[in-house]
Amino acid sequence: MLASPVMERHLYSIRMHASLGGRHLSGAEHLAPFEDLEELAAALVRRALTHPGGRAEQVTISIDPVVAETIRQSRLPDVRTVRVVDWEQGRQTALHWLKVAGVTESAAWTAMQAMQQGGAPDGTSMRGAMLVDVVSGERLELDHARGVRVSRMDLTLEAEQALRAALVSRNLDNPHVREALILAGKVLMTPGVVAELCWSDDPDYTAGYVAAPGFGYVRFPHLKPLGEGRGGRAFFFAREGFNLDQVVTFLEKEAVLFTRPGRFLRDMEAGE
Ligand code: PML
């Protein structure tokens, strides 16, 4: 997170990826000025070595310069919680919101089934997201194990403080929510995106969300059973005009900085 005006500073993308037993365990990242890199690297390594899913065996820290003039600035999506009693109701309700966004029922269902089975060909969670045809449910990414990793996005310090204040008062100020909002914010800026579906791969965290350009970030406290370690993300695209290189380059390489939180909308009940 950045403390001072962005455009006058040389910035770096700093990213951590950790694995255990050859599997993805944890990832996190920031956009930061040079003088913050050492402290951020230490915090990211600490996070990998104290992960609730086990102590990482391999930790990679990558640092790359980002040209300040190329950083896009934006606002985080609006946030709403839809209360659901269990993950089955959560999935039905998420299906409804995906249809509202413009995803066909069969494409939404196919993506949910793929995520439930881990997404990757060996039945584990993917490192990145699957890209899904909004009509047919066909997978569009080239590597079904890795998927597409959304990278190079962060909040300004002011935005982080405002976001955390809004989340604290709703009992939602945890890293899952903060990081998912930043990631979804970038996904919703992707050319041609129709919607995103996500649920956590942390066995202790059952929440997930549907995000779409028209309604922002709609979260569901339960989208999978407690103890389930398979989770992930599906980004839905209309096939017409879809350009895989453009989408992957935007998601993985272009830097986005969020300077303001979105609005917090009133909670809803599942059937509303
Ligand atoms: C994750 O754990 O990485 C994804 C969390 C998605 C849901 C976050 C929320 O509670 O809104």
Image (tube, rainbow, N blue to C red):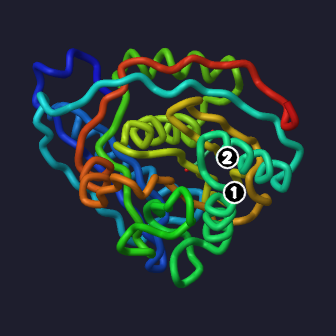
Q: Where is residue 212 in the image (x, y as percent from the top left)?
A: 54, 38
Q: Does the beta carbon of the residue at mark 2 sit less than 8 Å from ligand 1? A: no
Q: Depth check: 110 or 232 in front?
A: 110
Q: Which amino acid does label 1 sit on?
A: Glu
Residue 110 appears at what percent x and percent y? 64, 67
Q: Is mark 2 on a helix, strand or loop?
A: helix
Q: Report how far apart the C-alphas of labels 2 and 1 lie in the structure.
A: 6 Å
- Comparing 195 with 63, the one in front is 195
Q: Is residue 46 left or right of residue 223?
A: left
State the image quarter where residue 272 is shown. Answer: top right
Marking on residue 160: none
Check disc 1 and report the residue beneath it. 105
Q: In which quarter of the image is ligand 1?
A: top right
Q: Nearer the N terminus, badge 2 or badge 1?
A: 2
Q: How crowded is mark 2: few (under 14 residues within 10 Å), some or many (20 or more)?
A: some
Neighbourhood count class around disc 1 (C-alpha, 10 Å): few under 14, some 14–19, many 20 upward = some
Q: Position of residue 58 (x, y in %)?
A: 36, 70
Amino acid under disc 2:
Lys
Eyeballing the image, is 221 above or below 81? below
Look at 22% across and 39% down and name the residue there: 37
Asked whether the beta carbons under mark 2 and mark 1 sit within 8 Å of each other, the answer is: yes
The residue sitting at 64% across, 55% down in the picture is: 104
Q: On the picture, is 27 further left or further right than 219?
A: left
Q: Is mark 1 on a helix, strand or loop?
A: helix
Residue occupying image coordinates x 64% and y 43%? 209
Residue at figure coordinates x 42%, y 58% from the top left:
239
- What residue did someone put label 2 on? 99
Between 60 and 88, the one nearer to me in the picture: 88
The image quarter in which residue 115 lies: bottom right
Q: Is residue 256 above or below residue 232?
A: above
Assign the N terminus to one quadrant of the image. top left
